[in-house]
Amino acid sequence: MWNIRNGAVLASGFAGALLLSAAALGAGAYDGTWIAKVTSGGCAGTVVTITVADNVASGHLSGAHAATLASRAIDSDGTVSWSDTKRGYRSDVTFAGSSFVIKSSLRCGHLSVTGSRQ
């Protein structure tokens, strides 16, 4: 038997499903906080922290070789790059699953380090 009460429950459930679907679509595959720590070489002690929201990455390198990584969209293949010729760095990041690899040319030298989503 169909009545207004059943219709209200059905409409309410349908609206909730739409909201959940919209929220899921807004989330990016790489959303979260990603951290890598450099433990050797001229850049030892540098910590890379990248925050991703809706597939836009931003972050910073901390330690003696600090740098800010301005917001950049992540390409469909999971890569994003930053560079600053004045400060002398270039960083290329590849996200895959729950880990990422960052390859950088910094004043302290070249590094290639793997990090993970926290």
Image: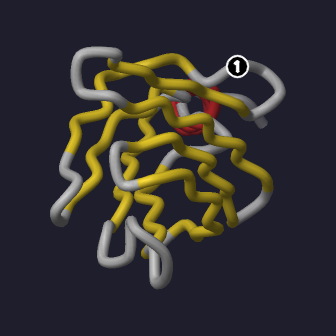
Determine the image quadrant of residue 62: bottom left
Query: Which of the image's four quarters has the N terminus?
Result: top right
Q: Is residue 107 above or below residue 99?
A: above
Q: Tell me residue 66's x, y (percent).
A: 19, 50
Q: At x 38% / y 66%, what residue is drawn?
A: 43
Q: Is residue 46 above or below residue 91?
A: below
Q: Nearer the viewer, residue 117 or 103?
A: 103
Determine the image quadrant of residue 13: top right
Q: Tell me residue 112's x, y (percent).
A: 64, 59
Q: At x 54% / y 66%, what residue is drawn?
A: 117
Q: Please give left or right for residue 59 compared with residue 6 in the image.
A: left
Q: Which residue is mark 1?
A: 75
| Residue 63 appears in the rendering | yes
Disc 1 residue type? Asp
Q: At x 46% / y 84%, what residue is drawn?
A: 39
Which residue ends up furthest to the bottom in the rendered image? 39
Q: Tell me residue 98's x, y (percent).
A: 69, 65
Q: At x 46% / y 24%, what residue is drawn?
A: 82
Q: Is residue 80 above or below residue 37?
A: above
Q: Residues within 10 Å of mark 1 (few under 14, many from 20)?
A: few
Q: Tell me residue 78's x, y (percent).
A: 74, 34
| Residue 5 appears in the rendering | no
